[in-house]
Image: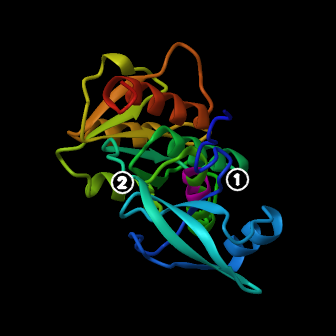
């Protein structure tokens, strides 16, 4: 007797929708997502979709109807609840486009709760396009199976970040001049990681950071890391010790 195929199939498309999902709901998808599902994925009536809304978890839906530029769905059941996310922020100096996209994608996959661009004295990126970064975050969530979307904060200059820093949140400063090995730092939650730009922090910025009571200097090994490597390495090490990888 042949085995019953898994439902939904592993190849089922997964999509973020900015509307509350619940049993019996009939959401409508239009715009670029509808175009992708209909004309790239070639979905048809009755095909399954996995949806998540950053509020109620993940849901299984089927395509109930197809229009010229939209499709209507029927929610069948919840497949997963909203996930608990480790209370880790990643504060990073923006770098060039492709490398910045990589930071956003990988930090989302690793499970950070908040992404905070920080403008430093040596930051060479003149303008951070937050709309594009927000789209990158959603795409990474769709790919990696996240049900909770990380917050993307507006860019802020380093002095302003430190001025308003919450006292209860440890700020792990990845200092190229050295510090405590990151695996030896006891900063379970609430915590944040700060990594610098391609040219590193200036001495004035380092002094400003070390004057902040919440700051703890960390080291990321004996070699000089690129800015994007440092951001993801530090996040990975924190998640392995204090996050949801255990």
Measure the alpha-carbon separation of dots 2 and 1.
Answer: 31 Å
Residue nearest the viewer, comparing 173 with 237: 237
Residue 19 image point, x, y percent: 45, 75
Residue nearest the viewer, comparing 225 with 9: 9
Choose top left, top right, bottom left or bottom right for residue 3: top right
Residue 180 in view here: no
Q: Is residue 214 magenta?
A: no
Task: Residue under label 2, please give it.
Answer: 82
The magenta-colored residue range is: 137-141
- Residue at left 36%, top 48%? 83
Q: Is residue 61 above or below residue 158?
A: below
Mark 2 lies on a secondary structure that is loop
Q: Would you say the magenta stretch is mainly helix, strand or loop? A: helix
- Residue at left 56%, top 44%? 144
Mark 1 lies on a secondary structure that is helix
Q: Quadrant of the C terminus?
A: top left
- Residue at left 78%, top 61%? 41
Residue nearest the viewer, comparing 244 with 27: 27
Q: Disc 2 or 1, which lies upstream in sequence?
A: 2
Can you tell which mark lies on residue 11?
none
Q: Quadrant of the N terminus?
A: top right
Residue 130 image point, x, y percent: 56, 66
Q: Residues within 10 Å of mark 1 (few under 14, many from 20)?
A: few
Choose top left, top right, bottom left or bottom right for residue 69: bottom right
How is the protein colored in the picture? rainbow
Residue at the bottom extreme, as displayed: 68
Residue 204 image point, x, y percent: 41, 42
Q: Residues within 10 Å of mark 2 (few under 14, many from 20)?
A: some
Task: Residue under label 1, please give it.
Answer: 97
Residue at the left extreme, as displayed: 168
- Residue at left 49%, top 38%? 110
Q: Is residue 140 magenta?
A: yes
């Amino acid at each position: 007797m042949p085995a019953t195929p898994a439902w939904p199939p592993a190849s089922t498309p997964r999509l973020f929708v900015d509307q509350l999902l619940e049993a019996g709901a009939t959401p409508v998808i239009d715009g670029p997502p509808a175009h992708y599902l209909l004309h790239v994925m070639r979905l048809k009536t009755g095909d399954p979709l996995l949806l998540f809304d950053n509020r109620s978890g993940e849901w299984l839906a089927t395509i109930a109807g197809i229009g010229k530029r939209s499709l209507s769905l029927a929610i069948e059941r919840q497949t997963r609840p909203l996930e608990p996310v480790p209370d880790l922020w990643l504060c990073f100096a923006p770098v060039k486009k492709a490398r910045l996209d990589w930071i956003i994608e990988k930090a989302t996959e690793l499970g950070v709760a908040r992404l905070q661009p920080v403008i430093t004295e040596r930051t060479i990126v003149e303008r951070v396009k937050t709309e594009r970064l927000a789209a990158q975050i959603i795409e990474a969530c769709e790919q990696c199976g996240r049900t909770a979307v990380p917050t993307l904060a507006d860019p802020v200059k380093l002095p302003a970040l430190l001025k308003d820093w919450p006292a209860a949140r440890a700020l792990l400063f990845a200092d190229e001049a050295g510090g405590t090995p990151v695996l030896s730092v006891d900063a379970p939650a609430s915590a944040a990681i700060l990594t610098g730009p391609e040219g590193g922090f200036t001495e004035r910025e380092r002094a400003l950071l070390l004057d902040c009571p919440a700051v703890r200097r960390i080291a990321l090994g004996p070699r000089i890391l690129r800015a994007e490597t440092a951001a993801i390495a530090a996040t990975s090490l924190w998640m392995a010790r204090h996050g949801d990888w255990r």
